[in-house]
Amino acid sequence: MSLHSTLDPKAFGRVAVLFGGKSAEREVSLKSGNAVLGALQAAGVDAFGIDVGDDFLQRLGREKIDRAFIVLHGRGGEDGSMQGLLECAGIPYTGSGILASALAMDKLRTKQVWHSLGLPTPRHAVLTSPADCEAAAAELGFPLIVKPAHEGSSIGMAKVDSAQALLAAWQDAARYDSQVLVEQWIAGPEYTIAVLRGEVLPPIGLGTPHSFYDYDAKYLADDTQYRIPCGLSAEKEAELKDLTARACEAVGTQGWARADVMQDASGQFWLLEVNTVPGMTDHSLVPMAARAAGLDFQQLVLAILADSVEARG
C-alpha cells in the first residue's frame, strides 16, 4: 500500500477531527488535534474540530460527519470506546479498530499477548497492595519502572531503586489507575518506530538527560535528542523493524501506530508498548519518522485519513 493518499481532498467529505477529551492526556491531545485540523484544512479537506466533552453525543447527532479523524489520546479516545461509538453511528474513522485499541491501551494484556507469541518484553508484575510491592522487589530486583496500566504520555511513571521508592511510586501511579504495572528496568538506548499503512517507517533513536523518556522529555524539554538514522547497523535496524511489525500485527493495529522498544547491553530488543493514537504535536515522533520517509505533515495526515475510507477486516 502506498504511503501517500491519492484521493482528492474533497473526496473525504466532511471530516470531524476529534481531540481534547477528558483523559489525563487532554493537553497533548488539544495540541495534536489543532495541528491535524490545520493541516487538513490547508490541504483543502472540509474539516472541523470537536473538543470531545459531555455534549459529544448530541453533536454527533447534530453535525453532518462523513468520517472522523481521531486525535484523542488516552482513555475515552484510544481505548476502543470511541471506536465502538463511531461504528454504531456508521461513521468511518482513522486508526485501529475496537479490539486493537482496547488491547494496546492495556499495557498488561498487551504484554501477555506478546509473551504468548514469544515476543520479547520485560519481566513484570502487577501491583495492587504493599505486599505486591514487596513480592515484586524480591522477584524482579532493582531498578524497576512503575507505570499505570492504562495511561500514555508517561503519565504516572517513575523509575525506582529501593523498596521505599517502589511503594511511593505505586501509590502515586494508583491515583491514575487501579491497575499498576512494574517492569524490569532495561538499561540501554530507546527506540520508537512508527507504522503507517502497513509500512514500518525509519526508527528513531531517543536520547535524554532524564532518567527515562518521561512526559517532560516528550513534550516540554529542549534537550531531548532524536536520531534519524537511529544509529543501528543495517542488520539490527532490519531486526528492529521486523520486531515492530510483528508486535503491531499481534495487537491488530490498523492505519497507523507507534511502538516503543528498548535495547539492552547485549543488543537484545525489548518491546514496551504500542500506541494506536500517537502524538501529533511539534515534538511528536510519528511526523518526524514520516519526514524521514519523505512525507511532510500534510501528506502524513492525508495518508492516515485515507485509511479511514477502506473497509475494516
Image (cartoon, helix red, strand yellow):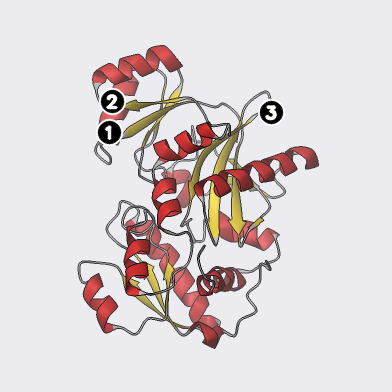
The CA span between labels 1 and 3 is 33 Å
The CA span between labels 2 and 3 is 32 Å
Task: Please name the residue shown 27% across and 58% down the image.
Answer: 22
* Quadrant of the image occupied by residue 110: top left
**Amino acid at circle 1:** Asp
Mark carried by residue 172: 1
The vertical placement of 170 against 22, above or below, is above
Position of residue 154 measured from the top left corner of the image (x, y, whole percent): 41, 42
Q: Is residue 224 visible?
A: no
**Amino acid at circle 3:** Gly
For the residue pair 168 and 147, the one nearer the viewer reads as 147
Per the image, label 3 sits on a secondary structure element best described as loop
Residue marked by disc 2: 168
Q: Is residue 185 visible?
A: yes
Mark toward the start of the polypeptide (1 vs 3):
1
Q: Tell me if mark 2 has few (under 14), some (14-19) or many (20+) residues whose alpha carbon lies within 10 angstroms of its own.
A: some
Badge 2 vs badge 1, beta-carbon distance below 8 Å: yes
Mark toward the start of the polypeptide (2 vs 3):
2
Mark carried by residue 267: 3
For the residue pair 278 and 113, the one nearer the viewer reads as 113
Position of residue 239 measured from the top left corner of the image (x, y, whole percent): 71, 39
Task: Please name the residue shown 31% across and 66% down the image.
Answer: 85
